[in-house]
Amino acid sequence: AFHPVPSQLPVVLPVTFTTTMKIPTSILLLSLIPIAQAFQVGHHAVGSRNPSSALRMTAARPISAGNLAGDASGKGLKVTVVGGSGFVGSRVCKILVDCGAEVTSVSKSGQAPQWAAGQEWTGSVDWKAADLLSADEASLDAAMGSPDAVVSTVGVVGTDLDVLLKGNGDTNAAAFASCKRKGVSRIAFVSVAEEVAACQENWLPEFFSGYFDGKVIAEAAALEALGGDTGQLCLVKPTFIYGGESFGLLPPRVTYDYGSGIEQLLSFGLIKAIADITPGLIKVALRPPVSVDSVASACAAAALGKEAANGKVLDGTKAVNTATDQPDATGLSEAFEWTKDNTIKFYNWAKEKIEESK
């Protein structure tokens, strides 16, 4: 079923959606999911963390706002997050609330996400329900409120060209048209990395042009809403976004722990050099993924008018991370450390048992 409204549409790298799209990244990030899950005893898909589990692949990676942590510059600022119930949008809402902003979320459900159920910050968000494709201007404007800045994290994946065009283009165009009517001064939009978009001509099925055309429509609508002022528009362009505490295939997703390890691995200089000289989807598959917290923080920084994000095109993981000084990924190092520590523990345990049996 088509769910074009942001609460139903986490923003992830679309070209990993089927085996006919983005095969290299699917192999790299998704084929090892069962292995990663096997290392997560007591850390199942429901997402409860258990630091004392007998086996864990890497250490927990809690939400990180980068240099926005402790920032209170959002006081008095009104921000509407379109897609605020979703994977990225909900984290944008949390970061903005922590920065003191008055936050409104517009999504189909109009509810806080399940992962944040019961968390105190959700009570500071005005959760509004609206269907971006069917709402009339008056009802949509009412849901959007009168924000100083707007963040849109809306996106959809699939195999139907029309669905992709509407879910990525028309939905955002409607939201940004409301921004224009409201006189919004700043906009941040989660689009797609240029290297991914460059693959559409020779590497991806024809129907996927709907996805990329939709993103182009959305970017143009955002710029039009600002009267052509690129200095107030931030385009956040990730490849594969990882995060949360569960694995998924539809849409494709890997956990913080696992994704952090992949990000660190693919950030090594040698792999980067290889990626730089390889073509198309192979290049994209060798690029490091980016944490959902990093994407959300970049969006929040733009909404707050931070110089490192506002008016910038943040294309790729490095640019997104740099916008809020996110720490380097350490998942791989932590996995090796865990392996070393537990190997030593197992050796000592086995040695004791052997001695006891003599």
Image (tube, helix red, strand yellow):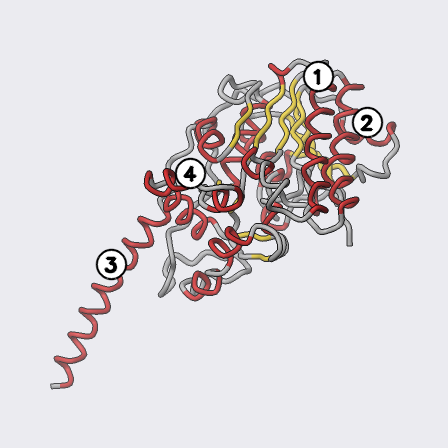
Q: Are marks 1 and 2 in contact (CB under 8 Å)?
A: no
Mark 4 surroundings: few (<14), some (14-19) or many (≥20) residues within 10 A:
few
Residue 174 position in % (x across, y down) = 79, 30
Closer to the eye: label 3 or 1: 1
Helix, strand or loop status at disc 1:
loop
Helix, strand or loop status at disc 3:
helix
Q: Is residue 91 above or below residue 56?
A: above
Name the residue beneath numbered marker 3.
341
Q: Residue at x 70, y 50 (%)?
A: 158
Q: Which label's residue is closer to the chain start, 3 or 1?
A: 1
Cα distance between the residues tagged 1 and 2: 16 Å
Q: Which label's residue is closer to the chain start, 3 or 2?
A: 2
Disc sitting over residue 141 in the figure: 2
Q: Are marks 1 and 4 in contact (CB under 8 Å)?
A: no
Name the residue beneath numbered marker 1.
226
Cα distance between the residues tagged 3 and 4: 38 Å
Left or right of residue 200: residue 259: left
Q: Is residue 16 above or below residue 300?
A: below
Mark 2 surroundings: few (<14), some (14-19) or many (≥20) residues within 10 A:
some
Name the residue beneath numbered marker 4.
277
Mark 3 surroundings: few (<14), some (14-19) or many (≥20) residues within 10 A:
few
Cα distance between the residues tagged 3 and 1: 54 Å
Q: Amino acid at mark 2?
A: Asp
Q: Please identify the quarter of the rendering in which residue 104 is found.
A: top right
Residue 161 position in % (x across, y down) = 76, 45
Q: Nearer the viewer, residue 94 or 140?
A: 140
Q: Amino acid at mark 1?
A: Leu
Q: Which label's residue is closer to the chain start, 1 or 4?
A: 1
